[in-house]
């Protein structure tokens, strides 16, 4: 049979379609994936985790956590030990006043029936007051004036920082769904109708405006469905970094390694053994590497030759980044981390992903056993796990593990520390790391650690967010 050009093109197209549209099959059952005729089980290609706004990927590994400087306080709470931290993401800079004002603005715009939500999120600007100094201009202007919009937010306690991170998770995931055409922007959303990642995942999304590009549901021929975690579209939670993550990111040993050898242990987050800049352009040599207090009565140098140029805080992108690309890990403001403080954290620890502060919860269920319980702000309600439901479990029994191994009787929950009598350490004592604009250089060493009650704040403590890296490191 003689074939003309048109017939050849048609046959070639048919072969291409038959090959190109071939369904991927399960290697264990032989059933087709993504095929409504075979039940509709889905498997999607995953190109890797998207880097969320403001984040930098920090490649994980093993490192020596703890003191790299003389223990001048004689606390002995940061003895050296080797731990491994998996890869994660960290904010390139500290959270700024402008970032935090965006958060407070959103709360005030959306939660009209609950004005106390925005009011409770406001930083305490009175932290600038000093009974022997005139700091009222900072009380009035630091948080709101545009001159300070790129400066790190302060006066934010640990609880407020944690709530900001949760809000940021929802806004970023909402943005991703809008970008993908699943949702439409809705500036008029109010109260419980606002987007919440957890509520969306379980199908509780009343009041959202959907876009034109919905996900195909292969369980039916032409059905659509919500985005699921299995799609890999939305990001994991923004959160505070753990103490181990923060210290690992601050040390940034990636710039001091040859194969598997760390040739020189850093004292600070930059290369070298001094506080002054030694690399780069000649004009920069000799300048202080971070915003710290240089000495008694010396916040920034002399007029005409200011050194670190920071009498108080400075814009978050100032100075030179460390080898992870992170700014101000050894100065400007100290930073909250997730951990509960214990002086013996170096003894009671896991050598992988070390963290103290676990409190295990589960999604609350309604009377029919369905995840359908939300609070007045549209967020899923979580309740503590119980010992009864964990009778046969080996890795944990109870919800509250903040005091694990250091309480007199762990199962009874009695705190071994006499809070208010011999110590200020309890399960609300949170670790903060790094030096600030008002600290001597000792505190700029990543291994140093201090603590403060999670409901308190100061003019020297800010924060930055982190995120888990899913999949390959």
Image (cartoon, rainbow, N blue to C red):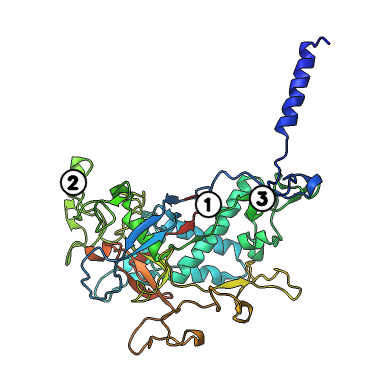
- Label 2, label 1: how far apart the Cα atoms are: 41 Å
Give the tally of numbered discs: 3
How many residues crowd mark 1 within 10 Å: few (<14), some (14–19), many (20+)? Answer: few
Tag in front: 1 or 3: 1
In which quadrant of the rendered view does residue 107 lie?
Answer: bottom right
Residue 292 to residue 21: above or below: below
Foreground label between 2 and 1: 1
Question: Taking 250 as reference, is 162 left or right?
Answer: right
x and y percentages locating residue 143 in the rendered image: 40, 62
Which circle's residue, 2 or 1, is located before the other in the chain?
A: 2
- 226 with respect to 134 (left or right): right
Measured Cα–Cα span from mark 1 to mark 3? 27 Å
Which residue sits furthest right?
A: 1
Give the answer, above or below, for where 348 lies relative to 180.
below
The residue positioned 59% from the left and 45% from the top of the image is 46
Q: CA distance from mark 2 to mark 3?
A: 51 Å
Q: Return the mark for residue 471.
A: 1
Q: In x, y percent, where is residue 168?
A: 52, 58
Q: Estimate the x, y position of residue 4 in percent, counting from the top left.
A: 79, 10
Marks 2 and 3, the one that precedes in the sequence: 3
Please say if the residues under marks 2 and 1 sit with CB atoms less than 8 Å apart.
no
Per the image, the residue denoted by label 2 is 285
- From the top left corner, tell me how far across and down residue 300 is, in percent: 21, 58
Q: Give the camera-side residue of 242 and 172.
A: 242
- How crowded pointer 2 is (Cα within 10 Å; few <14, some 14-19, many 20+) is rated as few
Q: Secondary structure at mark 1?
A: loop
Q: Secondary structure at mark 2?
A: loop
Work out whether residue 13 or residue 147 is closer to the camera in this orientation and state it. 13
Q: Residue at x 38, y 86 (%)?
A: 417
């Amino acid at each position: 049979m003689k074939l003309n050009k048109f017939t050849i093109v048609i046959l070639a197209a048919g072969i291409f379609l038959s090959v190109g549209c071939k369904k991927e099959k399960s290697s264990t059952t032989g059933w087709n994936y993504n095929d409504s005729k075979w039940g509709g089980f889905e498997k999607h290609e995953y190109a890797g985790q998207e880097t969320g706004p403001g984040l930098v990927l920090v490649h994980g590994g093993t490192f020596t956590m703890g003191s790299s400087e003389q223990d001048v306080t004689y606390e002995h709470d940061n003895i050296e030990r080797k731990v491994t931290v998996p890869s994660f993401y960290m904010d390139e800079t500290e959270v700024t006043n402008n970032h935090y004002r965006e958060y407070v603005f959103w709360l005030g715009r959306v939660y009209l029936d609950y004005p106390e939500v925005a009011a409770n999120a406001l930083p305490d600007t009175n932290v600038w007051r000093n009974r022997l100094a005139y700091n009222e201009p900072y009380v009035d202007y630091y948080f709101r004036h545009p001159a300070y919009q790129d400066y790190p937010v302060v006066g934010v306690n640990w609880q407020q920082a944690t709530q900001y991170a949760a809000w940021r998770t929802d806004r970023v995931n909402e943005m991703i769904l809008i970008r993908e055409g699943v949702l439409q922007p809705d500036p008029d959303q109010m109260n419980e109708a606002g987007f919440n990642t957890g509520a969306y995942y379980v199908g509780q999304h009343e009041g959202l405006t959907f876009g034109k590009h919905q996900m195909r549901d292969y369980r039916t021929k032409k059905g659509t469905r919500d985005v699921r975690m299995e799609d890999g579209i939305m990001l994991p939670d923004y959160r505070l970094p753990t103490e181990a993550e923060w210290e690992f990111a601050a040390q940034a040993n990636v710039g001091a390694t040859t194969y598997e050898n760390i040739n020189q242990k850093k004292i600070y987050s930059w290369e070298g053994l001094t506080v002054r800049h030694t690399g780069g352009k000649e004009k920069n040599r000799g300048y202080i590497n971070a915003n710290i207090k240089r000495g008694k009565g010396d916040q920034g140098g002399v007029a005409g030759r200011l050194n670190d140029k920071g009498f108080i805080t400075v814009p978050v992108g100032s100075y030179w980044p460390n080898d992870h690309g992170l700014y101000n890990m050894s100065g400007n403001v100290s930073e909250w981390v997730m951990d509960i403080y214990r002086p013996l954290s170096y003894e009671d620890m896991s050598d992988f992903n070390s963290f103290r502060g676990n409190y295990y919860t589960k999604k609350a269920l309604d009377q029919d056993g369905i995840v359908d319980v939300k609070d007045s702000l549209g967020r899923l309600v979580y309740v503590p796990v119980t010992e009864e439901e964990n009778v046969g479990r080996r890795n944990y029994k109870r919800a509250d593990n903040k005091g694990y191994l250091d309480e007199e009787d762990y199962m009874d929950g009695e705190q071994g520390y006499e809070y208010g009598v011999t110590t200020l350490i309890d399960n609300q004592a949170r670790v903060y790391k790094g030096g600030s604009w008002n600290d001597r250089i000792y505190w700029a060493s990543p291994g140093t650690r201090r603590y403060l009650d999670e409901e308190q704040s100061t003019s020297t403590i800010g924060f930055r967010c982190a995120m888990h890296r899913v999949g390959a490191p």
